[in-house]
Image: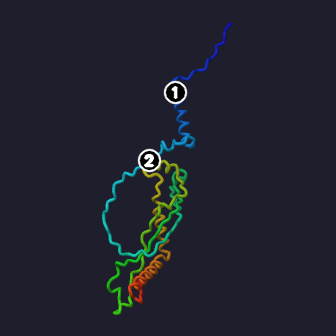
Amino acid sequence: MTTPIRHLPRRMPGWAKAVSAVVLVLVVFFAGIRLSVLPGLKDLFGTETHDRSGPALLQSIQDISRYDAASGNFQVVVDLEKDTKYLPDAIRGTRTLYVGAGTVDAYVDLGKVGEGDVTVDDDRTSATLRLPHARLGKPALDTDRSYAVSKQRGLLDRLGDFFSDNPNGEQAVQQLAVRHIGDAAKESELTKRAETNTTHMLEGLLRSLGFKEVNVSYGD
């Protein structure tokens, strides 16, 4: 009578058991960190930031003679889309929705006021000033208040971002936001407000010095 052969379960080698145990411990360990189950682990393996920058060097000094009389806050929604001919957007193409916030200052350049632009009567009770028209400064984008709402990229663009030193760069939409903010400032009454504020400032200053009549005008 033939005795049936029983197949014994194959035993896992010792090294395999050790590797499995280590993997299991690591999984539980990092899961505890991720889910905050094990207190104190985040502090143990937390990242630290070190600022090793050198001191700032003064390169030049410029005298500023302009009076910043008004500042406007602007916000623009930039919708920038780039397509490639003969390729669908899923393969090559980008579309970025970006909210840009920035400021534009309006100023009067008092350094351009000549001797003939200021007249004072003999009694020093009346003064007449002729100032240049107010101008707009360069738009300044506030990166703390600007952000990308959505980004859509094709497959080739995603691969390009993977090998790029500056993935998902927002330089193009930021430049576009600055341009739109500058255009909006030109359409606003920011320069008019700057001239009004400058006039009030000079009137208050000269009257405090004893002038009873102050006339301020603007022209090129």
Q: Which residue is mark 1?
A: 18
Circle 2 sits on which residue?
48
Pinpoint residue 125: horizontal percent, then vertical percent.
38, 91
Numbered marks: total: 2
Nearer to us of marks 2 and 1 is 2
At horizontal 57% and vertical 41% (from top left) the residue drawn is 37
Looking at the picture, which amino acid does disc 1 mark?
Ala
Q: Quadrant of the C terminus?
A: bottom left
Question: In this rendering, is residue 96 above or below 179?
Answer: above
SS of the residue under disc 1? helix
- Indicate which disc, 2 or 1, sits on the residue closer to the N terminus: 1
Tell me if residue 112 comes above or below residue 11 in the rendering: below
Q: Is residue 119 left or right of residue 77?
A: left
Q: CA distance from mark 2 to mark 1?
A: 33 Å
* 214 versus 11 height, above or below: below
Badge 2 crowding class, 10 Å Cα cut-off, few under 14, some 14 to 19, many 20 or more, is few
